[in-house]
Amino acid sequence: MSEAQALRVGIPASKWVYLHGCADTYEKELLKRPKLHRSPAMKIMGEELEKSSNLNLVRDIKYRDIYSCFPIAVSVLTNELGIVGKHGSDLTLTGGLPYHGGPGSNYSLHGVAALVSRLRADRGSFGLITANGGLISKHSGGIYGTTPYSVTHPNASRWTRKDPRLYQEYLNEGPEVPVSTAPAGMGRLESYTVIHKGNGKEYRAICIGRLNDSNERFVAICNDDKLMKRLKEEDYLGHEVHVATNDSGLSTFSERVVRSSL
């Protein structure tokens, strides 16, 4: 909505909030990402937010609502954007997605609404809203403030945004990890989890790792009770396991050699 339209519909200038910058990016498929705990797409989103708003995400932003479907989404984004929150309240305006509607609740719009109230009460301040979807796969961010857009963009005749396709090309051309569809041999664990039945008993372990010989990434499962207990009791990241794929295409991992490469 333009200032002229806001005036036509009777919104007083004291309530105006401007979008100063925005960015949208897409990450590579999960298994093709060079590092599972990093997000180049989040990093580029942050860089483009700063460029489009002419503001610094750490120094100039007072309020933040970071999309919080899972803790890892918050941890990865704050790491990529260099944001440090002494308390969880530094990163949310609503209390966080788990406590404010849950998935599918149009959460980020609630974050924008909460930010608007803060900005109207604290004129001259700026706030950041982020959102993501998939397996930390697609990202959006916006920077808002009551300061007129013309103040942060003195050389712009009107509101503009950079075409996301221009910086998405850089992400698309980034390195990818080859994925094995029939892994076999020794490999190193990059990540894993243990699934439980309703009675609390271990049901299945799922891992993502790299094959030693080819460095291809693989996904495999394990149903060995003893190994699943050890996976819970010890840190197995970097440990070597044996991987095999049967005629049906099911890949499993087992423990033959226990040696950490980290």
Image (cartoon, helix red, strand yellow):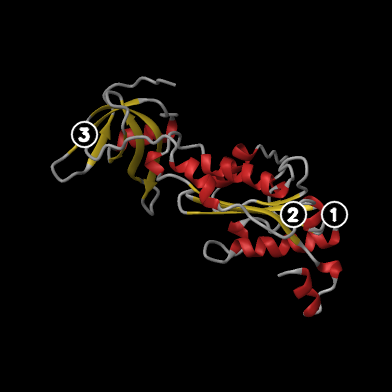
Residue 227 in view, yes or no: yes
Front residue of 246 and 129: 129
The local secondary structure at tag 1 comes to loop
Quadrant in the rendering for residue 217: top left
Query: Which sits earlier in the primary sequence, circle 3 or circle 1?
Result: 1
The local secondary structure at tag 3 comes to strand
For disc 2, the marked residue is: 156
The local secondary structure at tag 2 comes to loop
For disc 3, the marked residue is: 244
Q: Amino acid at mark 3?
A: Ala
Q: Amino acid at mark 1?
A: Gly
Residue 67 in view, yes or no: no
Please tell me whether residue 220 is drawn above or below residue 7 in the rendered image.
Answer: above
User: Which residue sits at x=64%, y=51%?
Assistant: 66
Percent of width and height locating residue 172: 44, 43
Which quadrant is home to the C terminus?
Answer: top left
Q: Do the CB atoms of the residues marked 3 and 1 lie less than 8 Å apart?
A: no
Q: How far is disc 3 from disc 1 in space, using C-alphas?
A: 60 Å
User: Which residue sits at x=67%, y=57%?
Assistant: 160
Q: Do the CB atoms of the residues marked 2 and 1 lie less than 8 Å apart?
A: no
Query: Which sits earlier in the primary sequence, circle 2 or circle 1?
Result: 1
Query: Which sits earlier in the primary sequence, circle 2 or circle 3?
Result: 2
Q: Is residue 10 left or right of residue 83?
A: right
Give the residue furthest to the bottom: 9
Percent of width and height locating residue 139: 54, 51
Question: Which numbered circle lies on residue 124?
Answer: 1
Depth check, mark 2 against mark 3: the one in front is 2
Give the residue furthest to the left: 247
